[in-house]
Image (cartoon, rainbow, N blue to C red):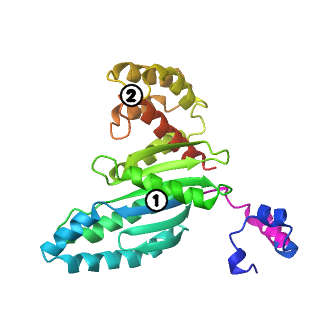
Amino acid sequence: MLEEDKQNIYIEVLENNGENPDLIKSLNELYREIGKPPVYYAIVVMDGDSMGEKISKAFEENKIKIITKKLSEFSKEVKGIVEKYSGMSVYSGGDDLLALFPLKTVLEGYKEIVEKFKEYMKDTGYNFTASAGLVISHYKIPLNYVLQEARSAESKAKKVDGKDAVYIKYIKHSFSSAEAPIKNDHLQLFEELISFLSDEDFPFGFIYQLQELLLPYLPKTENEEPVKKLTKYLIEKKPYKRKDEFAKFMLDTKELFDFKEPEKIINTLKVAKFIASGV
């Protein structure tokens, strides 16, 4: 049986350090049986929106007790939600959260946490929301860098109009990356986008071909019609079974796709495709 502090270590680390040959042997046997651990994981950093302003108002209106009670109750439940999605809660205090998740469960886990936060806080008389940074990283990227990027992503989420958003970013082993803001209420639509990009026959290279077509209109444009037409044109050219449905989804889903901001469209597609690939 593996020692508890060694359970999540990657075999390459042990081999490179030339340490613990018995553990290396045990890991190789385990990997043959269940497969190697994924090379990408996710970090979520979440924080309540405008909490200082709401807390100050609650003190003035003598409602601080109910708010602190609800925050305490939510904080106690978070660990269980994180573990439900095979994650690990590093820190949970009131409206603050730092947690690690597998790539394949992070969206569902984050979505439930945000929904639970709103559910707990709805009886306080205030409109409580939360925003987060969600960074998906290759395990060989230094953890302090990934944490820094997660906190930066959280700060960017706090600048989204109306907040209540998550800023999602991936970082590959090469340090190449893409990032996109998604409103929490639009995560279901984002998951629908991922389902399109998960199709086996989704056209390879579509996103980069679209990026090339839209170069004259990047990063923003006042005239969205050419961007819409070029997007529709490229989709219709592809031998993709669900292309009509996908074209309609892209053109009609204004919550995800603002055709006056084609650069955001490209980045949203890149992030969704990366998650869809499940690397």
Judge by depth and name the residue closer to the eye, 170 or 32.
170
Q: Disc 1 vs disc 2: Cβ atoms closer than 8 Å?
A: no
Judge by depth and name the residue closer to the eye, 111 or 62.
62
Q: Residues within 10 Å of mark 1 (few under 14, many from 20)?
A: few
Residue 256 place in picture, x, y as percent:
38, 40
In the picture of the structure, the residue carrying the numbered disc 2 is 220
Quarter where residue 50 is shown: bottom left
Magenta span: 24-41
Identify the residue at image location x=64%, y=58%: 142
Look at the magenta stretch and give its main secondary structure. helix
The answer to whether residue 104 of the structure is visible from this angle is: no
Q: Residues within 10 Å of mark 2 (few under 14, many from 20)?
A: some
Q: Quadrant of the N terminus?
A: bottom right
Q: What's the residue type where badge 1 is placed? A: Glu
Tell me the element at label 1.
helix
Q: Which mark is residue 193?
A: none
In the picture of the structure, the residue carrying the numbered disc 1 is 108
**Of tags 1 and 2, which is closer to the observer?**
2
The answer to whether residue 211 of the structure is visible from this angle is: yes
Residue 245 place in picture, x, y as percent:
43, 33
Residue 212 is covered by the magenta coloring:
no
| Disc 1/disc 2 C-alpha distance (Å) | 31 Å
Tell me the element at label 2.
loop
